[in-house]
Image: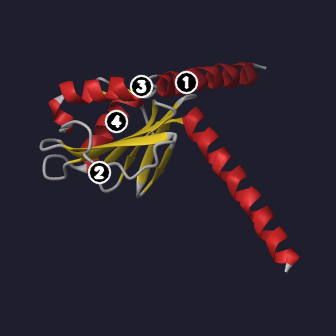
Amino acid sequence: MKHRFFFTVIFFISFSFIFAQSASIPNGYRKVSLGMTLSEVKDALFRDKIFGYRGDADVSLLPSDYKQTIIETQGDSFIAESWFLFNDDKLYNMAININPDKMDYATVFRTLCKKYGEPLFLNPEKAMWKNSSVQMSLEKPLTIKYIDIIVNEKLLSEATAKESAEEILRDDFLNSL
């Protein structure tokens, strides 16, 4: 009986520690957060010179009715370049390439572990922290990504459904020959 109680207490303490670690994951970097509108992100990027944002691009190759938008920036300090992906005018994915001349992977990895605990996933190419709404990863050579899990899963589901429908149409076409 004592062993069962001891293991139950250890389990709940461990679960609480893991949840506390994952709950503290940030949903963005500096003044840019997942869920912000396109105009809010542009304003935040313009005010924060570390990203190197210089305003809208002169040309966009995306169709005007396309639901997704991307902002690309070129920094000249710790951030070499960054990308901000939007769906329905909301930021759902950020990728920030850190300048390898000013920072190294091991230092960033140790810093993230110190702040957010051990990663939930780790291999030689990627470390990942996650909570119920945000996935943050550090990928080699030196990229930090923030992803809105709910929006990303919805987009992946829609893409899979579209592929399935196209496969059915393809099979129907082939069968009609």
Task: Identify the residue under disc 4.
Answer: 112
Question: What mark, if any, has residue 67 been given in the picture?
Answer: none
Question: What mark, if any, has residue 37 been given in the picture?
Answer: 3
Q: CA distance from mark 1 to mark 4?
A: 16 Å
Q: Position of residue 18 (x, y in %)?
A: 54, 27
Secondary structure of residue under mark 4: helix
In the orientation shown, which residue stands out farthest toward the bottom?
177
Task: Identify the residue under disc 2.
Answer: 142
The answer to whether 75 appears left or right of 26 in the picture is left
* Earlier-in-chain disc, 4 versus 3: 3
The answer to whether 25 appears left or right of 100 in the picture is right
Looking at the rendered structure, the kind of residue marked 2 is Leu
Looking at the rendered structure, the kind of residue marked 1 is Phe
Task: Identify the residue under disc 1.
Answer: 19
Counting every numbered tag in the picture gives 4
Looking at the rendered structure, the kind of residue marked 3 is Thr
- Between label 2 and label 3, give the one nearer the viewer: 3
Q: Position of residue 175 (x, y in %)?
A: 87, 75
| Residue 30 in sight from this viewpoint | no
Q: Residue at x 34, y 35 (%)?
A: 112
Q: Residue at x 50, y 28 (%)?
A: 22
